[in-house]
Structures are given as structure tokens and as C-alpha cells.
Image (cartoon, rainbow, N blue to C red):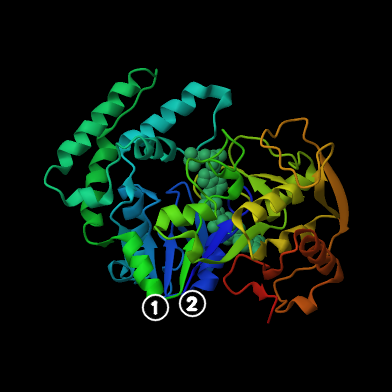
Amino acid sequence: MKVDVLLGLQWGDEGKGKIVDVLSPNYDIVARFQGGPNAGHTLIFNNKKYVLHLIPSGIFRENTVNIIGEGVVLDPVIFSEELSEIKKSGIDLTKNLYIAEKTSLILPTHRILDAAEEAELGSAKIGSTGKGIGPAYIDKIGRNALRVGDITSSNFKNKYNALKNKHINKLKSYKFDYNIAEYEEKWFEGIETLKKFKFINNSYFINEALKNGKKILAEGAQGTLLDINAGTYPYVTSSTVTTAGVCSGLGIAPSKIGEVYGIFKAYTTRVGSGPFPTELFDDNGKILQKFGYEFGSTTGRERRCGWLDMTALKYSIEINGVTQLIMTKADVLQFIETIYISEKYQNYPSGLFPYELNEQVKPQLKAFKSWKENLADFSSKDEFPDALKDYIHYIENETKVPITIISTGADRNETVWCNK
Ligand code: GDP
Ligand code: IMO
Ligand code: MG
């Protein structure tokens, strides 16, 4: 058996949570392999909405084991808050949620460092989610991190204090007021909550599961253009978001990767700072923002909106080895008069994604007719309006990858399987 992967091809928020929830009945295990509580994955079913930050989106399926993998950075406070929300729906998470022993912990001081760093950058700020992601990964790479497996050791408190003191020394170089006490108290309560869960040797667990014929889906967070290497650096997150991150974040070999589902919105959004060649500042941008309800699931910030960008999409497909595409939010484009796609960047060879995106990078736009129809009631691709079929055909023809799922609304049921 191999590990299938679902990951974002844009700047995050492509609808990963919804689609992982839809796919998860086909899988025995769903595993998050990177990122942390910067993620906000929305699931809607039975008229209820859940936003997951750390817990994988297979959690609402009774027979699916969910794993927080060792590539993740975990904040025990956010983890506990999320548990309390899910518990309300009667699910006992201690049974089907396992955590990798090597998962790094986000300390209260990581959050403070994140905020202090952003404040110092001023108008050049990354626009981070403020969850301490960058500083936590810095400690991991710098070989200083505390990990989930450490919390049961007798000297955990000493290790915690040593790292906290390092952070406090670092904070002296910033002009930044902070208060640790309140969050720290909740953090230690969160550590006690964590102890109720099963900790696993991630790599062993996943590889044994594969040998035993289990079906595994790796759930990505963020999107390829936010990847630490592949993304629009420095306006990126601090983890490996791409398929490569599945190998390091779950402890499996590249040869164990199976299908790679690449998910994208029918247009593009970005939250936080950084370049965005197809960004719209006109009424069309406002329409996408309004009808797409484009607010960050984690921070509530307005998402910036723009046209679909084929250069970025092709690049993301290539570096992730995408075998199937999933398109979401096609329904939102019904409100636009004439839809555009950026075919390429002017003055750049077709297919080149310049890593220094700047104001010189101008999209070359191609117009498409709008479908102007509500898609919620369509259950097959054949029934789609011709204008939507043309849009789909163009993308498949350009990327040479089939779109196998089209999402036509936020609910679990608003999903069209194209090969059925
Ligand atoms: P994720 O981070 O990739 O899981 O995506 P988010 O949950 O942050 O953002 C996606 C948003 O779009 C959420 O509010 C979803 O409920 C919503 N959504 C997902 N798919 C669709 C769709 O096909 N149509 C519409 N209108 N909304 C969708
Ligand atoms: P999901 O999984 C959209 C963005 C932040 C900021 C940059 C760095 O829901 O798709 P960080 O807190 O990671 O240091 O912020 O990355 N960002 C996301 N944008 N969706 C996400 O996750 C994101 N996670 C981080 O807005 O620009
Ligand atoms: Mg999100």
C-alpha cells in the first residue's frame, strides 16, 4: 500500500478540510504531516460547522484513525480548545486520535516571539497568524525543541524553563511588552490533557500500517505557494508544505507516495502579506470576497482575492507530482460577469514561476463566459452549464491532469465526483 496525499496548490484555504472529510470514509488513517494551528480547516455537515486547526479532518468518521504527525508543531492550548469543541458532538477522541512522540511543542514564548518579530518588521511584516509557527520551527531546526514525548519525563519542567529563559533573553532585544502567566497556566493544563492520548512512533506506525494493507491519506496544511522552499519567500510559512514534506513529516520513503490530490480554488485567495500577481482591487475582487465568504478561518482577516493563475497552478502541480486535481468554489464564480484566468506572465517563458514575484510580473488574461447558475443541485459533471465545462476543459487541457472532484458548496454533500 501507499500513502495518498491531499495538499493545497495555492496560498492555502483551498478547501482541504472539506475534501479530506469527504474522502476520509475511504481511508483507515488520516495524518497531518506539517504546519500547526496556523491552519484552519472548515468542515460543514448536518448544518454544523467545525474549524479544525491541529486535529486531522478525518476525525468525524468513526472508523478512521487520525494522526498528528511528527512534522507538525503543536500548541497544547489550541489543541485542548479544539478537543472541547469536538467533544460537544459526542466523539471520544482519545480512541481515534494518536500523536507522534516527535511532534514539536509550541511554547507560550514562541507566540510572543512571533508577535515581537512581526511588530519589529512593521510594514514589512509577513502577516503571520500569530500562532508562534516560525519561532517553533526555528527551535526545531536549531535542535532546541521540546517534543510531545518529553512531557512524561521527570525533568520536563526544567527543560521547559531552560527553553523559556532562552526566549526571554531573546525578547530583551525587542521593544515589546508581554505577559506570559495567563497563557502559561492554560498551556500546562493542555499538557495534562495531552497525556490522555496515545503517543506513537510515527514512522513505525505508518510503515507497519502500510504493510498491513491500511489505506492512509496525508492531509496538508497551508498551500504550496506558502512552502518554505517553493513558496513566495519570505512571505511563506516555516514548513515543507509539498509532497516532500509528507516523507519527512510522517517518516515514509518517497516510493511510498501514491495518489497526490492537488486542491485549488476556481479563483485565488491569499491572506497575509506578499506578492499576488492576479490580485483584484476592483468590484470583481469584492464579489469574490463577499460571495466566497473569504475571511481567514484562523484569524478572521479578509482574504485578498484574484483570478486563477495557471503559472502558479502548473508550478505547484509539477513540484508536488499531482496526479488528480480537485477544484473548489466553482459556485462563487457564478456571480462574476466575465471570468478571467491568467494564462502566463507577460515577458516570462510560459511555465516559468519566477521566485521573485514583484510588480514587474504581469498576468496575461484570458476571458471566460460566466455560468451564472447556482451549482448546488448538480450531481454530475455532465449536467454542468457549458460555460463551466469550458472552464474545466481549459484547465485540464493546460495542466494535463484530470479534475476528479468539483466542490460546488461548503457542505460535505455539495461535491461532484467527475469519474462517476
Ligand atoms: P482549508 O484551509 O483548505 O481547509 O480551507 P478553509 O476551510 O480555510 O477555507 C475554505 C472555505 O471555503 C471554508 O469556509 C469552506 O467552508 C468553504 N468552502 C469549501 N469548499 C467550498 C465550495 O466549493 N464552495 C463554497 N462556496 N465554499 C466552500
Ligand atoms: P490552511 O491550512 C492561509 C499564511 C499567513 C501568513 C504566512 C505565514 O488553513 O490553508 P505563519 O503563521 O504560518 O507563520 O504565517 O502564511 N498562512 C496561511 N494562509 N491558510 C493557511 O492555512 C495558512 N497558514 C499560514 O497568513 O501570510
Ligand atoms: Mg484554512
Identify whether 60 is placed above or below 227. below
Q: Which quarter of the picture shows residue 420?
A: bottom right
Identify whether 43 is placed above or below 130. below
Dot label at residue 90? none
Res. 380 in view? yes
Which residue lies most toward the bottom here? 420
Q: Residue at x 20, y 53 (%)?
A: 192
Q: Where is residue 326 in the image (x, y as percent from the top left)?
A: 65, 65
* Apparent side of residue 237 relative to residue 225 in the rendered image (left or right): left
> Is ligand 1 closer than 8 angstroms to the Cβ of mark 1?
no
Q: Which amino acid does label 1 sit on?
A: Asn
Identify whether 267 is placed above or below 274. below
* Apparent side of residue 158 relative to residue 170 in the rendered image (left or right): left
Q: Position of residue 269 (x, y in %)?
A: 66, 47
Q: Which residue is drawn at 62% across and 38% down?
A: 232
* Apparent side of residue 200 relative to residue 326 in the rendered image (left or right): left
Residue designated by label 2? 25
Contact, mark 2 vs mark 1 (Cβ under 8 Å): yes
Circle 2: is it few (<14), some (14-19), or many (20+) Cα within 10 Å? some
> Is ligand 1 closer than 8 angstroms to the Cβ of mark 2?
no
Q: Which quarter of the picture shows residue 264?
A: bottom right
Residue designated by label 1? 63
Circle 1: is it few (<14), some (14-19), or many (20+) Cα within 10 Å? some
Q: Position of residue 281 (x, y in %)?
A: 76, 38
Q: Which residue is drawn at 66% across and 37% down?
A: 355
Which residue lies most toward the left here? 154
Q: What element carries label 2?
A: helix
Q: Is mark 1 on a helix, strand or loop?
A: loop
Number of disc labels: 2
